[in-house]
Structure formats: structure tokens, C-alpha cells
Image (spheres, rainbow, N blue to C red):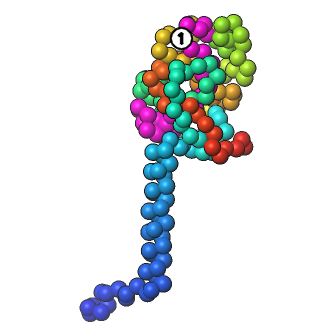
């Protein structure tokens, strides 16, 4: 084997330009993602709320009923099981899960009753029917009835297959990242 056989030919000007363009495009994509995340933008790929680009807006007051929020679930055994079952996506919250987008349907002191559907203080929540099995036929255990404790909120999504407080119960308000605002979304 000669020295000439082991060398590679030099890149042409066109190849160098292509490498430079691809490198710059990759750098621009990385910068765009970092800027979007730092600016509170998130992409929702779950059907619990419309798909697309969302923004986390600051919440300068206590969470209230009907607020649509981004919330990090706590790193509990229930949430780890939900992650293992595929109900939660990967993300930056405790336990390595993505923030949830859910509507607050009850706050501290309100009574939750879970039967065929969810009732808050005796009023049935629309689109809150309960499923006893998930999409793979695994059993789901509803959260027991009770009062939302101080420092917690009860969450809901009208999507029939949503994994929300019907199953995991109230979540701490300390996990609320802010209000969920649609930027560019669509409902498939």
C-alpha cells in the first residue's frame, strides 16, 4: 500500500460549502430550540390539549378554577408507574417527565366525588367520564373521593383518554410553571 492510496482527496469547494451550510443550519436549529425553551415555549404532542406550540405565561396570582396550566407532576411512585406505562413523556420535570397541560377544576377546600364521572361540589364536570382500563387494556384505579387539601389543585382534560387527577389525584401548586397559552396549535 502506497502513501497515495491511504490519503483522501481534498474536498471540493462545493463540498466545503455544503458542509458549512449544514453546520450553520444545525447550529441555528440548536440556538432556536434553546431560545424557545428559555422563553417558555413548549411543543405539545399529546392529544390531551391541541397539538402544537404553546407558551408558559407567568402566573402572578394563585391558581384558580378554569385556569389552563403547565404543571410538573411530583416524582412519586404513581407518577413513576405512569411514566413506565407511557402516560407521561420525557422532559425536565422531577422524575424526568414533561410538564402536563391541564385545566384546574378544583382548588383547596372543594369536594371531589368520582363515580361514573367527576363532580366538584356536587356539580358534574363535563367530559369527565371515567375509564376503568387504558388503551392497552390495563386497569386504571380512580382517585378516591375527598376534599382538595391546601396547597393542591385538582386537574382535568376533556380528552377521553387523558391521564389526569381522576386517576392520580390533586397535585401540589408548587409544581405549576404558569398558564398555558396556545401559540400555534391545531386539533387533529
Q: Is residue 156 visible?
A: no
Residue 90: in magenta span: yes
Q: Which residue is mark 1?
A: 108
Does the magenta segment cover residue 164?
A: no
Crowdedness near tag 1: few (<14), some (14–19) or many (≥20) residues, C-alpha within 10 Å:
some
x and y, in percent, of residue 174 in the image: 44, 23
- Residue 52's x, y, as percent? 63, 45
SS for callout 1: loop
Q: In the image, what residue occupies the spot 60% across and 22% down?
A: 104
Residue for point 65% across, 11% down: 120
Q: In the picture, residue 126 is in which quadrant?
A: top right
Q: Is residue 38 left or right of residue 145?
A: left
Location of residue 169 by image quarter: top right
With respect to residue 83, does 2 lie above or below?
A: below
Tally the marks: 1
Q: Above or below — where is 54 with respect to 77?
A: below
Q: Percent from the top left, x then y, of residue 159?
A: 68, 30
Q: For the N terminus, give its image quadrant.
A: bottom left
84 vs 47, nearest the viewer: 47
Q: Residue at x 31, y 87 (%)?
A: 7
Counting from the top left corner in percent of width and height, residue 143 is at 57, 14
Which quadrant of the figure contains the C terminus? top right
Residue at the (54%, 43%) spot, across then down:
42
Instruction: Give the extent of the magenta segment.
Output: 87-112
Reply above or below: 41 against 162: below
Amino acid at each position: 500500500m502506497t502513501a497515495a492510496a491511504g490519503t483522501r482527496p481534498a474536498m471540493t469547494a462545493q463540498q466545503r460549502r455544503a458542509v458549512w451550510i449544514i453546520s450553520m443550519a444545525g447550529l441555528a436549529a440548536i440556538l432556536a430550540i434553546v431560545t424557545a425553551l428559555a422563553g417558555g415555549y413548549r411543543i405539545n404532542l399529546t392529544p390531551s390539549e391541541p397539538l402544537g406550540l404553546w407558551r408558559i405565561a407567568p402566573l402572578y396570582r394563585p391558581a384558580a378554577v378554569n385556569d389552563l396550566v403547565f404543571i410538573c407532576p411530583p416524582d412519586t411512585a404513581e407518577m413513576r408507574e405512569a411514566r413506565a406505562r407511557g402516560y407521561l413523556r420525557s422532559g425536565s420535570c422531577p422524575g424526568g417527565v414533561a410538564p402536563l397541560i391541564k385545566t384546574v377544576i378544583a382548588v383547596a377546600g372543594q369536594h371531589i366525588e368520582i363515580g361514573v364521572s367527576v363532580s366538584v361540589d356536587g356539580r358534574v364536570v363535563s367530559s369527565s367520564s371515567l375509564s376503568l382500563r387504558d388503551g392497552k387494556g390495563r386497569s386504571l384505579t380512580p382517585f378516591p373521593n375527598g376534599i382538595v387539601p391546601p396547597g393542591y389543585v385538582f386537574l382535568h382534560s376533556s380528552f377521553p383518554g387523558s391521564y389526569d387527577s381522576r386517576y392520580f389525584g390533586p397535585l401540589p401548586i408548587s409544581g405549576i410553571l404558569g398558564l398555558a397559552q396556545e401559540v400555534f396549535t391545531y386539533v387533529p
